[in-house]
Amino acid sequence: MPTPGNHTSPTNHTTPIPTNHTTHSVPTPTATPVLRKGTYKVANKKMICALATLEIELRVEYETGRWGTFFIQPNDTKASGACGKNTVNMTLTFPQGFLTFGFQKDTKGKSYHLHQIKTQLTYKFPGAAVSTKFVANNAALMVMETALGHCSRCSNLSLEAGRTFWVDLVDQEVQVFEVPRTQTFGPADVCPQDHKLPVVAIVVVVLLLLLIIIIIIIYLICRKRSPAGYQSL
């Protein structure tokens, strides 16, 4: 009787290799900086000697013919400075640099003006290969002339810190030396350019005046040509 053969049929179970699913996080888009108004103060022995509320943008030429704009953000900016008898300095420091305003009284001590701006910015503008440090200083300014106890108010003031570095002050109110204890601004001395009428308004006014003159001339001519003794029924 034949001996039955032992048939071993091994079953090979292949364990599937788990697939590694790599989760790629979607980067959150960076918000584009915008121009924001900030309020800054400089004090000496608890007395405010400088008070400013304004929006600030820095414009620099970072490559030949290419200009970039940097907005100073109030939430990232700290104010410091020095209060003197005839000079007041306000320095705004932010992560990318600083901006210093230097104010000075006139010789009679009845008014003050901005005589210096000094600034530094380290920033990588769009299209630039690396971050670049920009430095500028202008100590020959004669702007924002204001009576003591008054504030300087201007809708838009562009200051030349250097040939390729400009500081733009927007919707600006600044008062130094004599600042009310209430930390509010005194009477405003408005900058000269805000007193000027826009060109369109001037043209409209001139045209209206010409029209009025023409109407008066026509009226006088018609009245002169009317027959003597004529009476309307």
Image (spheres, grey):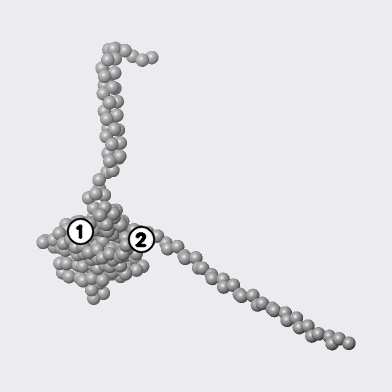
Residue corresponding to mark 1: 162
Q: Kindly identify the residue that appears in the image at 56 percent across and 71 percent down.
A: 21
Q: Amino acid at mark 2?
A: Arg
Where disc 1 sits, the SS reads strand
> In the rendered image of this protein, does residue 16 appear above or below residue 132?
below
> In the rendered image of this protein, does residue 231 appear above or below residue 142?
above
Where disc 2 sits, the SS reads loop
Tag 1–tag 2 contact (CB < 8 Å): no
Can you name the residue that lies furthest to the front here? 1
Label 1 Cα crowd, 10 Å radius (few <14 / some 14-19 / many 20+): some
Asked if residue 29 lies left or right of residue 74, the reply is right
Can you name the residue that lies furthest to the left here? 107
Residue corresponding to mark 2: 36
| First in residue order: circle 1 vs circle 2 | 2
Image quadrant of residue 83? bottom left
Q: Kindly identify the residue that appears in the image at 17 percent across and 70 percent down.
A: 84
Instruction: Give how far across and how far down residue 116 sits, in percent.
Output: 18, 62
Specify the label residue 110 is tagged with. Answer: none
Residue in the foreground of this view, choosing between 72 and 178 = 72
Q: Kindly identify the residue that appears in the image at 26 percent across and 17 percent down.
A: 224
Instruction: Give how far across and how far down residue 197 sits, in percent.
Output: 27, 43
Note whether residue 180 is visible. Answer: no
Q: Amino acid at mark 1?
A: Gly
Q: CA distance from mark 1 to mark 2?
A: 24 Å
Image quadrant of residue 233? top left
Can you name the residue that lies furthest to the right here? 1
Instruction: Give how far across and how far down residue 101 sits, in percent.
Output: 22, 64
Residue in the foreground of this view, choosing between 90 and 150 = 90
Query: If the image is split into quadrants, where does the N terminus sit?
Result: bottom right
